[in-house]
Every structure is written in structure tokens, then in C-alpha cells.
Image (tube, rainbow, N blue to C red):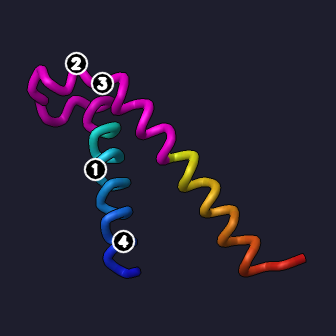
Amino acid sequence: MASSKLVGFIVYLIFALYFVNSSLNLIELPGFFENIHKWIVLIGGILILVGGINYLRANVKKHPS
């Protein structure tokens, strides 16, 4: 279970770093990433939605009303 959480964290971290880098242009990325940019943004958006849903579910389990 701990290893799957670590893998999930790494996936989120990679996409977060890509988004920060794409907005601030800290590191020049190869042209390959420009070709798949729209797919990266789509997958990143899905990950953000899943993270938000999991955050809400965790709060509901901690504080039942």
C-alpha cells in the first residue's frame, strides 16, 4: 500500500513540476514535449480532479456530520 502511494505521489510531482516549468520556463524542454503538450495538460487536469475528490472524501471520513 505504501509503495502505491509513493508511485502516486511521484506521478503528481512530475506533472506539477511540468506545469510549473511550462509557465515559468525554468528549463528548456526538448521538442518532444511540445508535441504531446495537450495530452500532458489533459492528464494533469484529470489528476487534479482525482486529487480534489480524494481530498474531499478524506475530510468527510474524518469529520462525519
Disc 3 element: helix
Q: Position of residue 55 (x, y in %)?
A: 62, 63
Residue type highlighted by circle 1: Ile
The residue to which callout 1 is attached is 14
Task: Please identify the quadrant where the N terminus is shown.
Answer: bottom left
Question: As drawn, is 52 to the left or to the right of 23?
Answer: right
Disc 2 element: helix
| Mark 1 / mark 3, whichever is N-terminal | 1
Image-quadrant location for residue 3 = bottom left
Magenta residues span: 21-47
Question: As drawn, is 25 to the left or to the right of 64?
Answer: left
Residue type highlighted by circle 4: Ser
The residue to which callout 3 is attached is 37
Residue type highlighted by circle 2: Asn
The residue to which callout 4 is attached is 4
Q: Tell me the distance, in whole angstroms, between the alpha carbons under discs 4 and 1.
A: 15 Å
Q: Tell me the distance, in whole angstroms, between the alpha carbons under discs 2 and 4.
A: 29 Å
Q: Tell me the distance, in whole angstroms, between the alpha carbons under discs 2 and 1.
A: 18 Å
Q: Are marks 2 and 3 in contact (CB under 8 Å)?
A: yes
**In the image, is residue 5 part of the stretch drawn in magenta?**
no
| Mark 4 / mark 3, whichever is N-terminal | 4
| Mark 2 / mark 1, whichever is N-terminal | 1
